[in-house]
Image: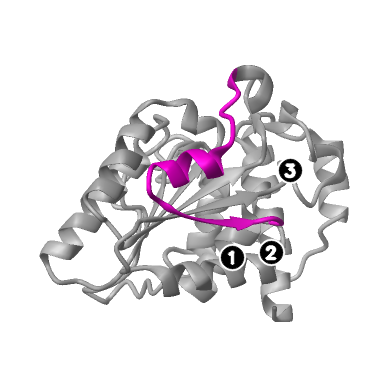
Amino acid sequence: MSKSLDNLVIQTRRDILRMVHSVNSGHPGGSLGCVEFFVTLYNKIMKHDDESVSKDIFILSNGHISPVYYSTLARSGYFDIKELDTFRKINSRLQGHPTNHDNLPGVNISSGSLGQGLSVGLGIALSKKLNNDSSLVFVLTGDGELQEGQNWEAFMYASANKVDNIIVTVDCNGQQIDGSTEDVLDIGNLKLKLESFNWKVLEIENGNSLDEVYEIMTEAKKSSMNGKPIVILMKTIMGNGVDFMMHTHKWHGVAPNDDQLEEALKQNPETLGDY
C-alpha cells in the first residue's frame, strides 16, 4: 500500500486520540482498531462521490466508534477537518454517536443503538435493486454487537431474498465494554453460523494490515451481485497503534489523560497535520 495511506492511518489515529482527550469522553479502543479498514474503504474500495446519484453507501452500525468515522469523513473532504475540534461538544454536529438530523455530510443514518445497522443497510440495498442502481451497500458491525438478536433476523432475511449488493464487515476484536466477548456472551463460530445462513463468508486474518484489508475487500466487491450476500470476518486489535491500549477492553470507552495522550502521540508522529 502507498506511503500516503500509511501516513493517513497515523494521522487518523492522532485525530481519534485528540478528539476523545479534548472532551474526556468517547470510544478510542474500537476506533483505533478499525483505522485501516476505514482508510482502505474510503480511499480504495467505495465509490462515494457525493455528487453522484449512483454511489456506494456506508452504514456504521456500531456507532460508538464515531471518532474514526468523523476523522475519515473529514479527511475525505466531506467537511472541514477543523470541525473535528467540536467532537461531543454542545451544539456540535459531531455527536458521540453519529446523527443525521444536522445534515452532517457522509452520515446516512443515526446509529449507536446496537444491532440495527444491518437491517437499515438491507433496506437501502433493496431500494437500489428496485431503482436498477448497481452500486453497493457496505455495513460495519462489531462482534459484540452480534449478541443483538435483530442481526440474525437480518442475516436470515438477506440470504432468503438474495440481497447480493451488500457487503457486511464484522470487526472481530474479541472485546466489548464489560470484557471479552467470550466471557460476556460467547458468540461461537461465526464462520460456520453465517455459512449456515447461506452467506458467502470471507476472512481478514489481520484487519490492521492495509494490504490484507484491500485484498479481501476487493475480492468481496468482485464476488458481489452473484446471488449471495457477503460478510467479512475481520480480526483486529482493539486500541491498535498505541501499545498501552492494545488487547484490552479497558479502553473501550475511556479517554487518555494528558500524559497518556502525549505518549500515544509520540508513538504516532504527525504526518499530514493536525486540525
Where does residue 112 sit, x and y in percent of width and height? 42, 34
**Disc 2 designates what residue?**
9
Badge 1 marks a residue whose secondary structure is helix
- Separation of marks 2 and 3 at Cα, in angstroms: 13 Å
Q: Is 239 located above or below residue 53 in the figure?
A: above
Is 192 covered by the magenta stretch?
A: yes
Q: Amino acid at mark 1?
A: Val
Check the image and report above or below for 198 versus 97. below
Give the image quarter of residue 144.
top right
**Magenta-highlighted residues:** 185-206
Locate the C terminus by quadrant.
bottom right
Q: Rounded to the nearest whole Å, what is the CA distance between mark 1 and mark 3?
A: 16 Å
The residue wearing badge 3 is 239
Marks 1 and 2 in Cβ contact (< 8 Å): yes
Residue 243 seen in this snapshot: yes
- Identify the residue at image location x=20%, y=71%: 133
**Residues at marks 1 and 2, CA–CA distance in whole angstroms:** 7 Å
